């Protein structure tokens, strides 16, 4: 992610349940805020976003 100009997060039910994906999302949010990188969420399937994600979209 360090060299990328943007991060695309493909958010699915399995993604939401994964602790690792949550950590990567937090890193992407930090990069978006601190370095001006774009964060592009793509929702796939029926998924209920956790509050920490929903509040950042």
Image (cartoon, helix red, strand yellow):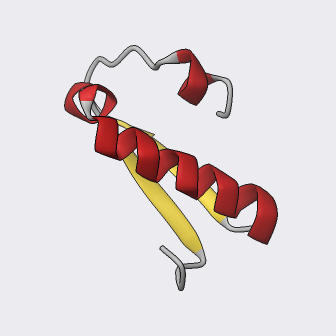
| Most foreground residue, 26 or 14 | 26
Which residue shows up at 53% across the image and 85% down it? 3
Q: Is 41 on the left or on the right of 46, as rendered?
A: right
Question: Residue at (58%, 25%) from the top-left corner?
Answer: 52
Residue 44: percent from the left, percent from the top?
Answer: 30, 33
- Residue sitting at the far bottom: 3
- The answer to whether residue 20 is left or right of residue 34 is left
In the figure, residue 27 lies in which quadrant?
A: bottom right
Residue at 67 percent across and 24 percent down: it is: 55
Q: Residue 48 location in percent, x, y?
A: 39, 14
8 lies above or below 45: below
Q: In this picture, is 37 found above or below 57? A: below
Q: Quadrant of the C terminus?
A: top right
Viewer-nearest residue: 53 or 26: 26
- Snapshot quadrant of residue 28: bottom right
Looking at the image, which residue is at 29% across and 17% down? Answer: 46
> As displayed, is residue 4 above or below residue 49?
below
Q: Is residue 36 left or right of residue 19?
A: right
Task: Give the tally of numbered discs.
Answer: 0
- Foreground: 34 or 7? 34
């Amino acid at each position: 992610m360090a060299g990328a100009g943007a991060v695309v997060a493909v958010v699915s039910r399995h993604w939401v349940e994964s602790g690792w994906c949550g950590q990567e999302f937090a890193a992407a949010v930090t990069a978006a805020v601190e370095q001006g990188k774009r964060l592009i969420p793509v929702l796939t399937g029926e998924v209920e976003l956790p509050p920490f994600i929903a509040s950042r979209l």
